[in-house]
Image (tube, rainbow, N blue to C red):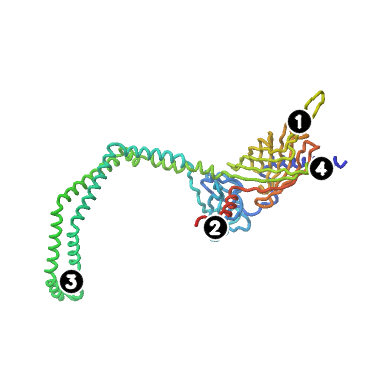
């Protein structure tokens, strides 16, 4: 009697779970536990690549709300933000798209501002920081590289190469000539500089000595002229000697200076020839300067990188360790799973599971008319590989479950803190003492960010093997591993 009562309770529990999952599948997106907390504000962005509904809204790195909806209004994305009631936003508050995590997850960052009045439910954020649009950068960097290759090829053309070569040679000859002139006339240049210094000193003394008379009336001009008469012959002598020295230097190096002037002229002619070619739009350099293709190529190249970066920013990785105690088998079942999520609405699950009773190998032998029946129960490691597609709060899974084809459905509540799930596999009833497929119903609830507890009913379609299970596990995202490993590594920067 007690056994029938237990089976009845298990059946009622299974029916209740399926009823909830069915109801939530058709009412997806309309479920809520109580009245939503906080208030709603709106923000408008030209580009929201990488943001999805339920994306976290943060203030100073602390969760302050969620992105409830992304809509399109007049070609601009309108974001509906539900802000926690204890977060106060002012009229000059601003919003911007930021990245975080090892692979660059997107989130929306708010700066609360400080100018009154305070934003109310239904108000709009007037200040937004647009995210740089570099969607095509990678593709067009290749185009830019091709253009640079063409530019180098053009420079290697005989005409351009010869003109550049002549310019370099002329510049080298000019510097060599200047070096020769300077090194061969160091003493004369020193004397010239000495004379110039003496000249400036004399002029300074004359000005100083004549400063007061200049500030007096015009009658003091006679005193100034007297001072000029006294020092004038010396000034004339210094100037005359300086001019003579300069004439001597020029005369002794006339040939070198003439050669220098000729080479400078040739160099300027070469530069002028190249400049005229570019100005006329001839050759690759001229085409690049006068043609808008280079501008568009660089613009498209800057946009091309975002295709790759956006895909990387959306990619998430989760690692899960879980263990459950099976009451029917009086043993534990453990599993390790890696979830790869390229987009918010789809992901891949790869896992390894150790089930205490998985499959059975049956061997029938006949020796001298004697029939021997042997059964060997396998509890080796089994593998799981599933593809999942999420529709708001409901996810459907298909693939391999513990070495056999299987299906699954998940229903999420409370911002994904609670998950109700159903899994069915072993459709060929290959497990030990199995008459039907393996059906398991359960629930996971996250007590903390990484720690969850689990429970449910296992193997519902095989009454002689039906039993409850309970347990828990831990789940980490790639960003969490970055901080865990970063905290444990020694400081090697010294």
What residue is shown at x 16% (from left), y 49% (from top)? 258
Of the image marks 2 and 1, the number of the one nearer the N terminus: 2
Secondary structure, mark 3, is helix
Dot 2: few (<14), some (14–19), or many (≥20) neighbours within 10 Å? some
Q: CA distance from mark 1 to mark 3?
A: 124 Å
Secondary structure, mark 4, is helix
The image's mark for residue 9 is 4
Q: Dot 1 corresponds to which residue?
A: 362
Residue 76: horizontal and vertical position, in percent?
53, 45
User: Which residue is at the front of the view, 7 or 26?
Assistant: 7
Mark 2 vs mark 3, foreground winner is 3
Of the image marks 4 and 1, the number of the one nearer the N terminus: 4
Q: CA distance from mark 2 to mark 4?
A: 58 Å
Asked if residue 41 shows in the view, the reply is no
Mark 4 vs mark 1, foreground winner is 1
Do the residues bearing badges 2 and 4 touch, measured as CB atoms within 8 Å? no
Mark 2 vs mark 4, foreground winner is 4
What residue is shown at x 80% (from left), y 28% (from top)? 372
Do the residues bearing badges 2 and 3 touch, measured as CB atoms within 8 Å? no
């Amino acid at each position: 009697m007690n056994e029938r009562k237990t089976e009845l309770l298990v059946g009622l529990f299974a029916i209740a779970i399926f009823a909830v999952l069915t109801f939530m599948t058709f009412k997806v997106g309309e479920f809520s536990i109580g009245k939503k907390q906080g208030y709603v504000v709106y923000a408008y962005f030209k580009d929201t690549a990488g943001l999805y509904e339920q994306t976290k809204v943060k203030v100073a790195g602390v969760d302050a709300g969620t992105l409830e909806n992304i809509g399109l209004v007049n070609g601009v994305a309108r974001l509906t933000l539900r802000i926690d009631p204890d977060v106060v936003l002012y009229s000059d508050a601003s919003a911007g798209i930021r990245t975080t995590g090892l692979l660059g997850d997107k989130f929306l960052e708010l700066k609360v501002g400080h100018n009154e009045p305070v934003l109310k439910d239904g108000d709009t954020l007037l200040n937004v920081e647009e995210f740089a649009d570099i969607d095509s950068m990678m593709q067009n960097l290749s185009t830019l590289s091709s253009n640079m290759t063409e530019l180098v090829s053009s420079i290697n053309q005989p005409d351009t190469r010869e003109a550049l070569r002549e310019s370099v040679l002329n510049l080298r000859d000019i510097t060599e000539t200047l070096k020769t002139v300077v090194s061969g006339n160091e003493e004369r240049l020193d004397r010239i500089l000495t004379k110039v210094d003496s000249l400036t000193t004399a002029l300074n003394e004359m000005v100083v000595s004549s400063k007061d008379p200049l500030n007096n009336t015009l009658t003091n001009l006679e005193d100034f002229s007297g001072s000029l008469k006294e020092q004038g012959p010396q000034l004339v002598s210094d100037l005359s000697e300086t001019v003579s020295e300069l004439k001597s230097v020029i005369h002794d190096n006339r040939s070198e200076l003439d050669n220098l002037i000729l080479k400078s002229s040739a160099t300027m002619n070469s530069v002028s020839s190249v400049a005229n070619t570019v100005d006329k739009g001839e050759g690759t350099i001229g085409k690049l300067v006068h043609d808008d293709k280079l501008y568009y190529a660089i613009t498209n190249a800057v946009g091309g990188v975002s295709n790759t970066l956006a895909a990387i920013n959306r990619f998430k990785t989760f690692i899960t360790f879980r263990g459950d105690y099976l009451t029917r088998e009086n043993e534990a079942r453990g599993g390790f799973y890696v979830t790869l999520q390229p987009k918010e609405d789809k992901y891949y699950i790869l896992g390894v599971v150790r089930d205490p009773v998985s499959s059975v190998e049956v061997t029938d032998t006949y020796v001298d008319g004697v029939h021997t029946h042997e059964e060997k129960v396998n509890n080796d490691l089994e593998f799981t590989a599933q593809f999942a597609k999420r529709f708001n709060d409901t996810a459907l899974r298909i693939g391999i479950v513990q070495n056999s084809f299987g299906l699954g459905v998940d229903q999420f509540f409370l911002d994904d803190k609670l998950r109700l799930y159903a899994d069915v596999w072993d459709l060929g009833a290959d497990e030990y003492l199995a008459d039907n497929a393996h059906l398991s119903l359960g629930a996971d609830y996250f007590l903390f960010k990484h720690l969850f507890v689990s429970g449910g009913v296992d193997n519902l379609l095989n009454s002689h093997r039906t039993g409850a299970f309970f347990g828990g596990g831990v789940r980490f995202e790639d960003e969490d591993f970055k901080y865990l490993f970063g905290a444990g590594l020694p400081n090697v920067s010294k």
